[in-house]
Image (tube, rainbow, N blue to C red):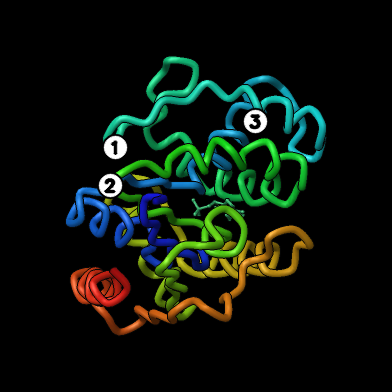
């Protein structure tokens, strides 16, 4: 029997990552931050001097991406990545390389390999639609664009980056549009995904809702 998967998809800065990580911890499941793979691909391309629009070259990099996840640490080619993949530049780069079908194909099996016992929580845009279509629990986690921009703003300020709220909102809306309108694996709520709108929820409330649903399906 395949290990159970909780697929959590949703737009940028919706809190998916935090919620998915905490749900995984509570259940003792593995955690796949699929967005990190697209961010790492964008970073690897930049480091190699490869243009983000060069589909075949970026896909080749994605296929041989030397990454290691351990706890909160991510290593690319043996070097700690830290916040280098969390900048607005890499957010935009990730969203650009993620629109290339050959790049998504190159990252497909790497993502499925995270599905080990006792279970997996995966977060991204296509966890429920493409990577783990048979997941017993699919959650579409979202929040208003304003609430998401504000959360991202606070995160960046806390990390010591400078940030501008109107710019962040505009970037986020642009990224949402690119993620929703692309032809491969567009961001959308699957018919069998449960909607979790966190605009007015705390992280804890969101985590508890996902845990309650996971008890329902197991
Ligand atoms: O989730 P995160 O913001 O880290 O993802 C960065 C970008 O990677 C997204 O804007 C999206 O374009 C892309 N992505 C994707 N499919 C996933 C996860 C992320 O296309 N499963």
The picture quadrant where one finds residue 129 is bottom right
Of the residues under marks 3 and 2, which one precedes in the sequence? 3
1 and 2 marks in contact (CB < 8 Å): no
Element type at marker 2? loop
Q: Mark 1: which secondary structure?
A: loop
User: Which is nearer the eye, 103 or 7?
Assistant: 7
How far separated are the C-alphas under marks 1 and 3?
21 Å
Q: Is residue 20 left or right of residue 112?
A: left
The residue that disc 1 covers is 72
Residue at 62% from the left image edge and 22% from the top image edge: 64
Nearer to us of marks 3 and 2 is 2
Ligand 1 neighbours mark 2 (CB distance < 8 Å):
no
Residue at 53% across, 63% down: 128
Q: Which secondary structure lies at badge 3?
A: helix
Q: How many marks?
A: 3
Residue annotated with mark 2: 118
Residue 62 circle label: 3
In the depicted structure, whether residue 110 falls above or below residue 8: above
């Amino acid at each position: 029997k395949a290990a159970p998967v909780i697929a959590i998809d949703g737009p940028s800065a919706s809190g998916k990552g935090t919620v998915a990580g905490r749900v995984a911890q509570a259940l003792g499941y593995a955690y796949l931050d699929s967005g990190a793979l697209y961010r790492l691909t964008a970073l690897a391309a930049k480091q190699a001097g490869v243009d983000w629009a060069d589909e075949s070259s970026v896909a080749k990099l994605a296929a041989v991406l030397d990454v290691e996840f351990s706890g909160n640490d991510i290593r690319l080619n043996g070097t700690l990545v830290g916040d280098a993949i969390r900048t607005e530049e890499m957010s935009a780069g990730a969203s650009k390389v993620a629109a290339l079908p050959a790049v998504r194909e190159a990252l497909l099996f790497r993502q499925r390999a995270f599905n080990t016992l006792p279970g997996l929580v995966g977060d991204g845009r296509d966890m429920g639609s493409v990577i783990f279509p048979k997941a017993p629990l699919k959650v579409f986690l979202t929040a208003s664009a304003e609430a998401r921009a504000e959360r991202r703003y606070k995160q960046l300020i806390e990390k010591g980056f400078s940030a501008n709220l109107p710019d962040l909102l505009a970037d986020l809306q642009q990224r949402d549009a690119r993620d929703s309108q692309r032809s491969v694996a567009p961001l959308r709520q699957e018919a069998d995904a449960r909607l979790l709108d966190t605009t007015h929820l705390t992280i804890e409330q969101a985590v508890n809702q996902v845990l309650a649903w996971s008890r329902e399906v197991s």
